[in-house]
Amino acid sequence: MTQTSTDEMRLELGAPGMTALHRVGLAGLWMTLDAFARGGIGLRGGSWEKDSRSVTLRWTGDPRAFLDDLLRRSFRVDAQGLVWFAALGAPLDHPQHAVALHKSMLGSFLQHGKSRRNRREPGVLSVEVDEQPFAIPFKALADYNHQSAAGDLVSGGRLARDVTLAGWQFPGGAVRHVGFSAHTALTESAGRALLLLFAPVGCIHFCMRQRKEGKNSIRAQSAVVVPEVTDLDVYAEARADFLGAGVLELHCAGAAEAAWRVLSRWHAKGLLRRLGLTGCRVMSFGAVPWVKSQKIRVALATVRPGREQDIETFALCQAALPARLVRPEGKEPFVDVPATPGLVAMNLGAGRPWYAGFAALLGDKRRRAHVFRYEKGGLHQMVTTRGQFDDEARRAFVMACHEAWRRRMGQLGGRARRENISFSTLVSREFERQRVAFSRCKNAATLRKEVTDFWARAGRLQQLAGWADLLPLLGEDGWQEARDLALLALASYQPASEDEKRALDEAVSTAEQGDEEGEAE
């Protein structure tokens, strides 16, 4: 930011002190002014100019009146109490995007009660998901701080030299010591503070649903993606594209997943190259055991686009394992988010195979139950699609485990008929025994024993024709990857008959009951 005179402010992408949040805020301001220009809206006592790299604001006399008018027109609340950003249009023009944005704002920038004023009555917005109505409740707002923040930017009829920041302006920023708040509070110039006000407009907002791993676990509830902005005009087009995203697409299970959803969508629309995007930062917010009354920033991640193949891998994962709307009988419907895409997103961002850490993912009983019950079809699509493994040896390993389990189920079916006992009971016992056996492997020796025993009991396997290529996976350096692949094979197995399907469903239910009984004890 350079202040060239008492009545002009020039804000540039490459100016000193500009962080990713400031740059996305400049994009939010650019988009807002562009909406004003298209709507024929002028600002009292001032004007503006903009190009692909900067915005220049001009005013006459005291800047307070100009900034008041700018913020009042930029940040509004609609008749139902939804957050209304002028840059993004009326909320009801894109209701699914609007309600996700509103919920994310209340869990991030506006999470503190002093940053907003709620209406007495809650709001409800009905949207259509899968051609059926879905009523989404939300906290209706009367107003919020962004609308009346001009006074913080002006002092004595001029722009303030230092503006003290609060958490609703810079999430995660806080006074270091309450006894010395004047010396340890975060401050900004008036220009950069103005950009922070517009940061929520340029950011992309997601709602998060995570399964609790324990009573005192941290559970994030919203994610804010902050892409790197290099061209304001192109970024405005890309941000507007997300107005068409549905409420299911705007739900995720992890911070990295939110960033990869942005990259995947823009890649599919041909916008990623035009943006010149170098990366996305993601802030996630949620409740923590020691501050249950507020939603605080619980994680901060940076995701780089990486290889085009990685983006295509996540796009396949997103298509194979989408969020879904669940309508339980006698209960309110809710959005169910799969667990696997979050793991895939973290792995791709770290340069690991997409299935790395699958054994750890199944370590939590709630995630394990969901993966085995609802995600096996999507996982089967992942493991059978060409190009999803670094080499065919990994795929051959999974296919060998599929074949071994199919043959083992055939053997159990023969035994059930001979001895006149329940096929489902036999499958349940064998399935859980094998899952636990793979999960408990702690070194290469125990894994080799379990895998070779699993294959041997199934008989001669066609998939082991190139067995020599699989040997490195059973060595000291590859056994953890082999354990992930073995469990992935169990989770992605597709039953060959209705009898197998019923037996496997019962096996998952039995395992869930066993976990609950063990926890109760």
Image (tube, rainbow, N blue to C red):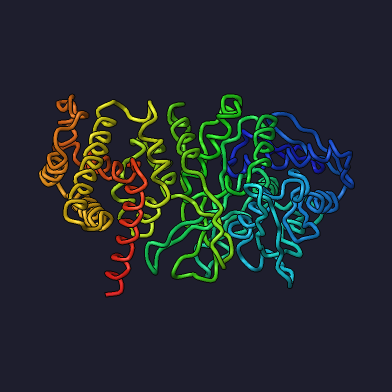
Q: Is residue 126 above or below residue 51?
A: below
Quadrant in the picture for the N terminus: top right
Q: Is residue 112 above or below residue 363?
A: below
For image coordinates 29% across by 45% down, the residue present is 490
Task: State whether residue 444 appears in this view.
Answer: no
Q: Nearer the viewer, residue 189 or 425?
A: 425
**Horizontal relation, residue 60 to residue 80: left or right:** right
> Which residue is nearer to you in this view: 421 or 193?
421
Residue at x 76%, y 36% (from the top left corner):
56
Q: Who is closer to the viewer here, 273 or 441?
A: 441
> In the rendered image, is residue 317 in sight?
yes
Q: Residue 129: percent from the left, percent from the top? A: 64, 49
Image quarter of residue 6? top right
Q: State whether residue 376 is above or below residue 216.
A: above
Q: How many marks?
A: 0
Q: Left or right: 94 with respect to 374?
A: right
Question: Residue lying furthest bottom in this view?
Answer: 521
User: Which quadrant: the C terminus?
Assistant: bottom left
Q: Position of residue 448 (x, y in %)?
A: 13, 41
x then y, percent, for residue 141: 73, 64
